[in-house]
């Protein structure tokens, strides 16, 4: 019992030390900057790019996985890496929230990048920054635009299962609800349409597009057109109207160039063939005069889309968790808070210590 109490005291002291140390260090934290790691980890961009090249070359869908991870991270507590945290005894993470549990992949890619950076410059680059850089590189590697990524985020020591369920737009939401969730994050209607364009490389699960293809899809598309008619038939073959067995079946949200980041997504919306209700609402909603005009603009001018997407991704990445600048940390393992990692190691060491005397 004495050993157990002593281990507990050590764990608590270590946790307090980390929190106090980071709090003191972060008090004067500057804004995000482009050269944040220039002296402490000058090769950070090259390391992330190399790992992302391997990931996307082996599976092009990995690009969409990483972009989605970044989006889901930033909409909950800001871009603080909270989406990467696993559940522990003392923390309920965001991965099992209804908007995340079946839609997020790519965690192992971030793990690999983190391991490489820990070898290059231990304890320097935050998981939140890694995810932000990786999302940019993911877009580039499938033909999308380049943008500069301001850096200097810290990893949160908290996560919010509740906010993950409420802050993130869902597949069957109406236009006003979607826009309100973007506005809440400080993102404009223009940002909403431009960022939705990332679905040009995304995949959707049957569970998320079933309501759309058995609902108003025929009303928004031209089913007299053989191509449109064939497309809806294909979607319905992938996703039957009833039955849970098909809920995890997937289809590309851009069926023309699913592995290329381009403006084809907006052409699909203009044809009334958006796979998700939330996507088609941008063009077909009676309340969407502004969003409809933007869809037309980006369909006609890919360069305008690329420019706005770049600007909007910078805005998205700049949604910060103000608390993390004072209580945040740089995790050694993106899945675990530093305190959790310390406790895990101490518990393991204690078990080994006790086993030696049994």
Image: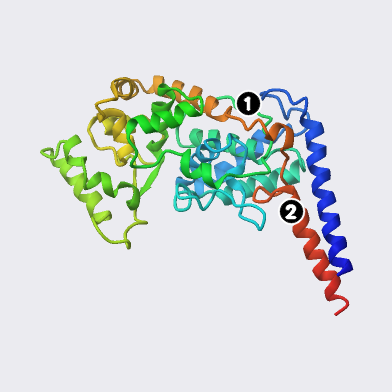
Describe the element under mark 1 as helix, strand or loop.
Answer: loop
For the residues carrying marks 2 and 1, which lies nearer the camera in this image? 2
Q: Position of residue 343 (x, y in %)?
A: 77, 56
> Dot 1: within a 10 Å radius of its alpha carbon, few (fewer than 14), some, or many (20 or more) residues?
some
Q: Is residue 220 left or right of residue 310?
A: left
> Dot 2: within a 10 Å radius of its alpha carbon, few (fewer than 14), some, or many (20 or more) residues?
some
Q: Which residue is mark 2?
A: 341
Q: Which residue is mark 1?
A: 150
Q: Position of residue 146 (x, y in %)?
A: 52, 26
Mark 1 or mark 2, which is nearer the start of the sequence?
A: 1
Residue projecting furthest to the left: 224
Marks 2 and 1 close (CB-CB < 8 Å): no
Viewer can see residue 221: no
Quadrant of the drawing holding the N terminus: bottom right
Residue that appears at 59% across and 39% down: 131
Relative to 71, say whether 11 is above or below.
Answer: below
Q: Is residue 358 left or right of residue 143?
A: right
């Amino acid at each position: 019992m004495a050993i157990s109490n002593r281990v507990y005291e050590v764990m608590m002291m270590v946790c307090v030390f980390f929190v106090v140390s980071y709090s003191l260090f972060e008090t004067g934290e500057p804004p995000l900057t482009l050269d944040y790691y220039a002296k402490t980890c000058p090769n950070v961009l090259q390391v992330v790019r190399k790992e992302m090249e391997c990931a996307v070359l082996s599976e092009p869908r990995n690009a969409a996985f990483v972009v989605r991870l970044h989006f889901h991270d930033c909409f909950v507590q800001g871009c603080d890496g909270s989406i990467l945290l696993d559940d522990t005894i003392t923390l309920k993470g965001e991965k099992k929230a209804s908007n995340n549990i079946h839609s997020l992949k790519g965690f192992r890619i971030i793990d690999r990048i983190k391991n490489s950076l820990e070898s290059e410059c231990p304890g320097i680059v935050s998981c939140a920054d890694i995810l932000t850089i990786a999302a940019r590189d993911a877009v580039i590697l499938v033909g999308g635009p380049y943008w500069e990524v301001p850096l200097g985020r810290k990893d949160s020591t908290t996560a919010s299962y509740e906010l993950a369920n409420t802050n993130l737009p869902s597949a069957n939401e109406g236009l006003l609800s979607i826009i309100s969730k973007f506005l809440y994050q400080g993102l404009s209607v223009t940002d909403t349409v431009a960022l939705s364009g990332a679905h040009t490389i995304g995949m959707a699960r049957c569970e998320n597009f079933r309501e759309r293809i058995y609902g108003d899809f025929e009303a928004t598309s031209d089913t007299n057109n053989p191509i449109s008619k064939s497309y809806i038939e294909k979607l319905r073959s992938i996703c039957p109207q009833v039955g849970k067995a098909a809920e995890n079946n997937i289809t590309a949200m851009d069926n023309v160039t699913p592995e290329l980041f381009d403006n084809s997504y907006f052409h699909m919306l203009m044809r009334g063939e958006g796979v998700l209700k939330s996507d088609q609402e941008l063009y077909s909603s009676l309340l969407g005069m502004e969003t409809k005009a933007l869809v037309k603009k980006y369909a006609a001018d890919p360069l305008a889309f690329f420019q706005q997407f770049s600007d909007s991704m910078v805005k998205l990445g700049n949604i910060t968790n103000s608390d993390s600048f004072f209580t945040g940390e740089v995790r050694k393992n993106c899945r675990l808070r530093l305190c959790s990692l310390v406790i895990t190691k101490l518990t393991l060491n204690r078990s080994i210590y006790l086993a030696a005397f049994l």
